[in-house]
Image (cartoon, rainbow, N blue to C red):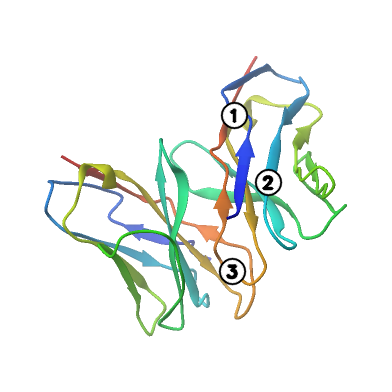
Amino acid sequence: KAGVTQTPRYLIKTRGQQVTLSCSPISGHRSVSWYQQTPGQGLQFLFEYFSETQRNKGNFPGRFSGRQFSNSRSEMNVSTLELGDSALYLCASSLAVTGFGELFFGEGSRLTVL
Amino acid sequence: GDSVTQMEGPVTLSEEAFLTINCTYTATGYPSLFWYVQYPGEGLQLLLKATKADDKGSNKGFEATYRKETTSFHLEKGSVQVSDSAVYFCALRNTGTASKLTFGTGTRLQVTL
């Protein structure tokens, strides 16, 4: 079956712009979570959505937001981009209704902010 | 808060050598522990996991034992292959945090012939 699909794979933006990243989870998975990966900070949890509701949130400023649609697809948005937002953004989906199920990661969207 | 500390890389080994990547953690409660692997240009893949003290996770020749007394979850493999070259991440998930994983900084492994 198809894995987690993230689009776009690569993008370049300038400071002050905003960006929207998309994630299509594995069919049947209702939980989608987002992580930011940078050389300096490593992998950090952004937020998790389940059935269109944000279930958990990491320590990121309000410029980072997300949402989930009724088909479980998710988007994350970063407004007023800063140089430090350059990162690989990873999406993961899970089958679990409660608690924790194995996370399946996409290949990521690599954002470069100039 | 929760944290995971991994040994610094890169780790360079010859094929068939023994591998150990150290991982220690700090967490309240009873976390579950994981090792993920990231091959070049790919996302993360779950390598193995352990959900309670003294559990041993194993997969593809890799093993790790959940040691609560030393708060450790070291990754080992008896004989590495060139195809094992990747970045390895230790992670924990604490009780009640759904899909929130806390990751270590990752350890790059390079295996040469």
Residue closest to the eye, B53 or A35? B53
Residue at mark 1 shares a chain with residue at mark 3: yes
Secondary structure, mark 2, is strand
Q: Residue at image x 84%, y 55%?
A: B53
Q: CA distance from mark 2 to mark 1?
A: 24 Å
Q: Earlier in the sequence, mark 1 or mark 3?
A: 1
Residue at mark 2 shares a chain with residue at mark 1: yes
Q: Residue at image x 85%, y 47%?
A: B69
Q: Position of residue A112 (x, y in %)?
A: 23, 42
Q: Amino acid at mark 3?
A: Thr
Q: Position of residue A17 (x, y in %)?
A: 12, 55
Q: Amino acid at mark 1?
A: Ser
Q: Earlier in the sequence, mark 2 or mark 1?
A: 2
Dot 1: few (<14), some (14–19), or many (≥20) neighbours within 10 Å? many
Q: Is residue B85 above or below residue A98?
A: above
Q: Is residue B96 above or below residue B17?
A: below
Q: CA distance from mark 1 to mark 3?
A: 31 Å
Q: Nearer the viewer, mark 1 or mark 3?
A: 3
Residue of label 1: B85
Q: Amino acid at mark 2?
A: Tyr
Secondary structure, mark 1, is loop
Secondary structure, mark 3, is loop
Q: Position of residue B55 (x, y in %)?
A: 85, 54
Residue of label 2: B25
Residue B97: give its label. 3
Q: Residue at image x 63%, y 35%?
A: B6
Q: Quadrant of the C terminus of chain A?
A: top left
